[in-house]
Image (cartoon, rainbow, N blue to C red):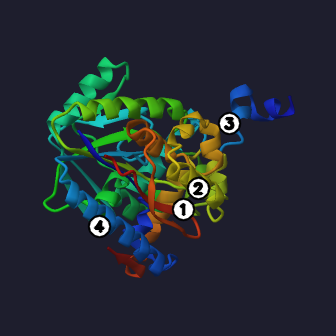
Amino acid sequence: MLVGAFAVAHTPQLLIRPETEDRDLVLRVHAAMARVKGRLQEMKPDAIAIIAGDHVEAFFLDAVPALAVYVGRECAGTFGPYRYRLDIQEDLARAVVEQGIERGFDLLYTQDARLDYAFYVPLHFVMPEPVVPIVPLHVNVYLPPQPTPARCHAWGTALGEIFRARPERVAVIASGGMSHFPGTDRYDSPEFDYDRGVLEALREGRGRELARVTGEELDKRGNIELRTWITLLGAVGDVRAEVYCYEPSWHHGNAVVEWPLR
Amino acid sequence: MASRQRGGGVAAAVSDSTHYRFPPSQAYPLNRCLFALKSDRAFAERFLADAHAATEEMGLTEGERADLRHMDRDALVARGAHPYLVFMAGLRLKMLAEPTKLEYF
C-alpha cells in the first residue's frame, strides 16, 4: 500500500556547505527535512521508494536508460567523503520491474550500479529510525533526449497502482528540484517565480497539469529534475500538496513538500 | 533557415536553444574525461598534480586539454562537453584543493 508521498531537494550544498551558501537557509531546509523524517517515523513504512535522476554517475554515455530500477540486495555509492550503503527491499523492487514491464514500460534494471547522491542526500536527512530498505527508481533528467513529462506521469501512475496492490507499506520520495541551471550562464538566475507557480498548482491539487508541460519548457525553466516530481504525481493523483518549505538560494529553489495521503 | 545553416541541421537548430543538449559523439573523449574528474577521486588527484600528464592517453585534442586545464566552461561546452559534467568536475577539483572551507552535515 502507498502510505506517504514527499518531494525533497537534494542540492549537494545541503550536505556539504561551502562558504558561498547561506548557513541559515541551509538549516531551514534541514528543519523541513526533519519534519519529513518525523512523518516517516509515524507512517512506519516497510520501504521507501525513491525517485531520482542519476547525475551521470551510475549511467554515463556508455548506456543511457530512460527509466531504471535498482533490484539488487543492496546499493552503494560515494559523495565527497561520504560512503553509503543501503539495503534494497528486493521483493518490492522485483515486483516493480516485473509488473512495470508487464504494463508496457521497457525498464532497465540493475543489480550493481552505483547510487548517485541524488538518492543519498534526501535519505541522509529523512531516513527514519530504525532504517528501512529502499527501492531506487532512476528517471533520466540530464542526458537528452529525456523521457517526456507525460511518460513520467504515466510511469508514476503505474507505480502507484503497483504499490497500492502490495502488502508492504510504501512511502515514495521524489528527489530533486526546483529551478537551477548548473554549468550554464543561468546558474545565478533560476526561475523562482515559475517554481512558486508550480507549488501553487500543487497546493490546489492540480499536479496532473504538469504531465502536459514539454521537456523544452522544463529545460527553459531550469526544472529538468521536475520529472521525478511528475513521476510521483502520477502515483498520488489530485491530492493537495503541503509545502514544508520553499527556500530560494542564489542558485537553487530548494523545496520540501508532502502530499498527505488518506 | 539561417539558424538551420548555423546549427548544421534541423535537430541542431531545435536543441540550440536548450541548456542541456544531446552530447555529440565527437565530444565523447572530453565528456569521458570530465566524468572521470567528477567520479574518480584518484584521477582527479592526478589531474590536480599534473593536468597534462593525467590527460596524456585520453584521446583528447590539444585544444580540449588546454580548456580542461583552465576549466574554461564556455569553451568546453562549445566543444560539446555536458554543462553538468563541467560544473561538477570543477566543483570536485575545488573541493579537493580547498577541503577546509566546507561544512559537512
According to the picture, the residue beneath numbered tag 4 turns out to be A81
- How far across and down, in percent of the image, does residue A68 sit? 34, 34
Mark 3 is on which residue type?
Ser
Residue B15, numbered label: 3
Picture quarter containing residue A71?
A: top left
Label 2 neighbourhood size at 10 Å, few (<14), some (14-19), many (20+)? many
Q: Do pointers 2 and 1 mark residues of a single chain?
A: yes
Q: Chain of mark 2?
A: A
Mark 3: which secondary structure?
helix
Picture quarter containing residue B5?
A: top right
Q: Do pointers 3 and 4 mark residues of a single chain?
A: no
According to the picture, the residue beneath numbered tag 2 turns out to be A195
Q: Is B31 displayed left or right of A4 in the figure?
A: right
Say whether residue B58 is visible.
Answer: no
Say whether residue B75 is visible.
Answer: yes
Mark 1: which secondary structure?
strand
Which sits earlier in the primary sequence, circle 1 or circle 4?
4
CA separation, marks 3 and 1?
Answer: 25 Å
The reply to whether the C-beta atoms of the residues labelled 2 and 1 are less than 8 Å apart is: yes
